[in-house]
Image: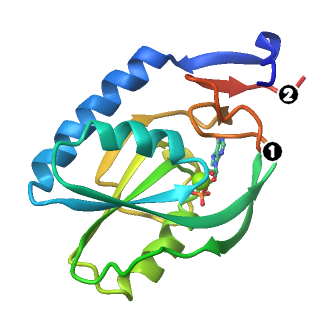
Amino acid sequence: MQVFDPHHSSILIDEKTIQNRVRELGAEISAQYPDGVTLVGILTGALYFLVDLSRAISSPIEIDFIGISSYVGTSSSGTVTFTKDLSREIDDRHVLVVEDIVDTGRTISALLTLLKDRNPRSLGICTLLDKPERRIVPVPIHHCGFTIPDQFVVGYGLDYNQAYRNLPYIAVLTPP
Ligand code: IMP
Ligand code: MG
């Protein structure tokens, strides 16, 4: 496990606060989909959130993943590339996209366009974090863990060049 330099970071959301909020979101989602829902996680950032969230949902669930990449370092490349497709059909299913963070909105927007064509019964978005100040493309967010200011964050799945995903909390990364 890489060493996280505390001089170049500060904790924004601690582990307990994340876990409490994930349980609340799980209850919200269970109430909304009593007959079940397919969780579609966006790789790789949403992995930790999706695992914890799925355990907080009491309705029947299916899990699938889609691979999308748009970020290099701390800035969005602006182009969204699909790197892995879903493993199963979603037609006539209630689908809830699970994302780590909505920033410009480009990723979610491109994904919604793709998934809508596959005729799900419903299509919702659940994001752990929302950075509304950076939004370029408006997107409907149905479940949101935390709204955060315009700062680059890592941990609990979020990375900086693939590092820091395994931190149990969300930290702001300040370059040295
Ligand atoms: P968007 O397409 O600009 O909304 O970007 C969404 C994707 O960019 C997320 O799925 C993240 O992978 C990545 N991202 C955006 N902001 C951050 C951040 O502060 N830290 C780490 N990754 C981020
Ligand atoms: Mg992502």
Closer to the chain start, of discs 2 and 1, is 1
**Residue 69, placed above or below residue 161:** below
User: Of discs 2 and 1, which sits in the foreground?
Assistant: 1
Q: Within 10 Å of the Cα at label 2, are there few (<14), some (14-19), or many (20+) other Cα atoms?
A: few
* Picture disc at residue 161: 1
**Residue 129, placed above or below residue 72:** above
Return the residue at label 2. 175
Q: Residue at x 62, y 66 (%)?
A: 68
Is residue 88 toward the left or the right of residue 156 in the image? left
Q: How far from the left and from the top, in percent, is residue 152?
A: 68, 36
CB contact under 8 Å: marks 2 and 1? no
Q: Residue furthest right?
A: 176
Q: How far from the left and from the top, in percent, is residue 173?
A: 74, 27
Is residue 115 toward the left or the right of residue 92 in the image? right
Q: Amino acid at mark 2?
A: Pro
From the viewer's side, name the closer residue of 106 and 95.
95
Q: How far from the left and from the top, in percent, is residue 55?
A: 31, 38
Please, what secondary structure does the residue beneath circle 2 have? loop
Q: Quadrant of residue 175?
A: top right
Q: Residue at x 64, y 30 (%)?
A: 166
Q: Quadrant of the N terminus?
A: top right
Please, what secondary structure does the residue beneath circle 1 have? loop
